[in-house]
Image (tube, rainbow, N blue to C red):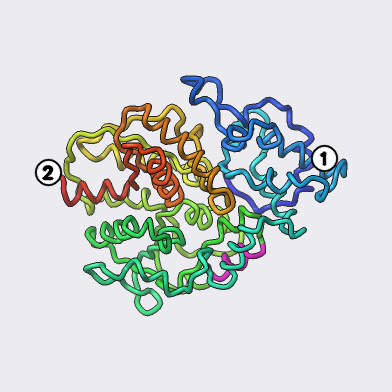
């Protein structure tokens, strides 16, 4: 699902009139279904069991708003319906197979209208205010971005002062969320062990703006994109590598609409695949274990990358990759994206609990993923469920193979 220069709700008038109410925005495609238990695909509809929360529902709400059948202020539920959506893109993936319509982008446009009318959730207002002040949504000074590097046993280049071929763009979640600090160090250790000439922006790194865009604050996103492109283009790097699919999607699909990029953007799993193929990352055999892979929505459905993460896992001897029933473009969202983790943490967690149950049904002992939002939310779910399922980023498994394998 290639991204495009964003449009207003008015631009989707024909689409919202053409919704056929087929319900494929709520369920997996029929030929993919393996069981009734894991056959649904829309977390918001699964949670609320009300049609307005599905992609179809938001298409018809948007039609009614465009035709002035009711106003933005008429229903207190409008904001809840618009924002209780992870924007995982599953509705759009299925809709494009039948009608070539884009319910997820309609929801993005609806949110942009809400932002213009100052109809934003309090949690999102704080999120946006922090971004404008600190260039991160965590409401912490920019120097906090360096904290994860404090106890590394090697130095990392500061690309504000030195040159390198590769920029490791850490991202806000991996750079500032305390629960993910150890994973962040893993990425740096792999790059260092592989002899990659890399560096970071450190305290000067700015948020990519992807979550702000999905909340509907397009102006803030454009400002961040322009400033990031100006700063990163000056570095003279060949490649930007990020471990966050949200950041990868921003650079890969949105930033080219803002300005010129004189570097290549890669997700960490894509870069890992390259290093493994080149032989600079040497993998050793691990004890036999069954692993299942959770597709991040922004890496999979929105950017089309399903192969690289799986190929990295399959290249490690001792690992059996066993798919969940909902996988690739029919994967169930972890529940954390689209501003949901910020505004509706309970809903985010309950959505992740569904995914943990699906992973357990495979018989796997490890659920691998490749996204900080997924890792954070799925770990929280396993803790609440007292599940024995271990949630790991693919890079953690790779480093274990490199350092502990035989």
Depth check, front residue: 32 or 389: 389
Q: Which mark is residue 64?
A: 1
Depth check, front residue: 21 or 230: 21
Q: Give the left or right position of residue 402, taking residue 349 as reference.
A: left
> On screen, 94 above or below 295?
above
The residue under the point 45% across, 63% down is 263
Task: Look at the magenta stretch and give its main secondary structure.
Answer: helix
> On screen, 351 above or below 194?
above
Tell me where residue 218 sits by quadrant: bottom right
Among the two numbered marks 1 and 2 on one chain, the one whose residue lies closer to the N terminus: 1
**Percent x, y for residue 33?**
50, 21
Residue 12 magenta: no
Q: Give the left or right position of residue 287, taking residue 3 as reference.
A: left
Tell me where residue 106 sits by quadrant: top right
**Percent x, y for residue 231?**
49, 73
Q: What residue sits right under mark 2 in the picture? A: 406
């Amino acid at each position: 699902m290639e991204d495009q220069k964003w449009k207003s709700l008015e631009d989707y008038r024909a689409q919202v009139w053409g919704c056929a109410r087929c319900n494929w925005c709520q369920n997996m495609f029929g030929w993919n279904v393996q069981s009734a238990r894991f056959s649904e695909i829309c977390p918001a509809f699964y949670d609320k069991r009300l049609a307005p929360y599905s992609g179809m529902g938001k298409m018809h709400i948007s039609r009614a708003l465009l035709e002035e059948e009711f106003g933005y202020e008429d229903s207190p539920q409008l904001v809840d319906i618009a924002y209780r959506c992870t924007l995982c893109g599953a509705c759009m993936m299925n809709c494009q197979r039948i009608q070539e319509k884009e319910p997820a982008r309609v929801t993005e446009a609806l949110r942009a209208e809400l932002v213009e009318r100052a109809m934003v959730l309090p949690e999102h207002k704080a999120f946006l205010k922090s971004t404008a002040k600190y260039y991160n949504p965590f409401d912490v000074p920019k120097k906090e971005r360096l904290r994860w590097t404090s106890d590394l046993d090697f130095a990392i280049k500061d690309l504000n002062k030195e040159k390198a071929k590769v920029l490791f763009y850490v991202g806000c979640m991996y750079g500032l969320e305390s629960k993910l600090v150890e994973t962040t160090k893993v990425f740096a250790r792999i790059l260092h062990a592989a002899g990659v000439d890399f560096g970071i922006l450190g305290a000067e790194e700015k948020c990519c703006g992807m979550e702000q865009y999905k909340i509907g604050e397009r102006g803030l996103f454009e400002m961040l994109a322009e400033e990031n492109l100006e700063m990163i283009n000056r570095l003279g790097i060949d490649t930007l590598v990020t471990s966050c699919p949200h950041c990868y999607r921003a650079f890969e699909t949105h930033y080219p609409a803002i300005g010129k990029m004189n570097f290549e953007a890669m997700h960490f799993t894509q870069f890992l695949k390259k290093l493994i193929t080149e032989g600079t990352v040497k993998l050793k055999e691990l004890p036999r274990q069954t692993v299942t892979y959770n597709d991040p929505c922004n890496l999979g459905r929105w950017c089309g990358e399903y192969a690289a993460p799986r190929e990295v896992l399959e290249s490690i001897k001792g690992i059996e990759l066993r798919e969940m029933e909902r996988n690739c473009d029919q994967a169930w969202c972890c529940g954390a994206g689209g501003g949901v983790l910020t505004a509706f943490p309970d809903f985010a967690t309950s959505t992740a609990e569904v995914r943990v149950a699906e992973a357990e049904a495979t018989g796997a002992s490890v659920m691998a993923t490749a996204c900080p939002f997924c890792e954070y939310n799925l770990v929280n779910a396993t803790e609440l469920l007292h599940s024995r399922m271990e949630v790991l980023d693919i890079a953690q498994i790779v480093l274990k193979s490199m350092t502990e394998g035989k």
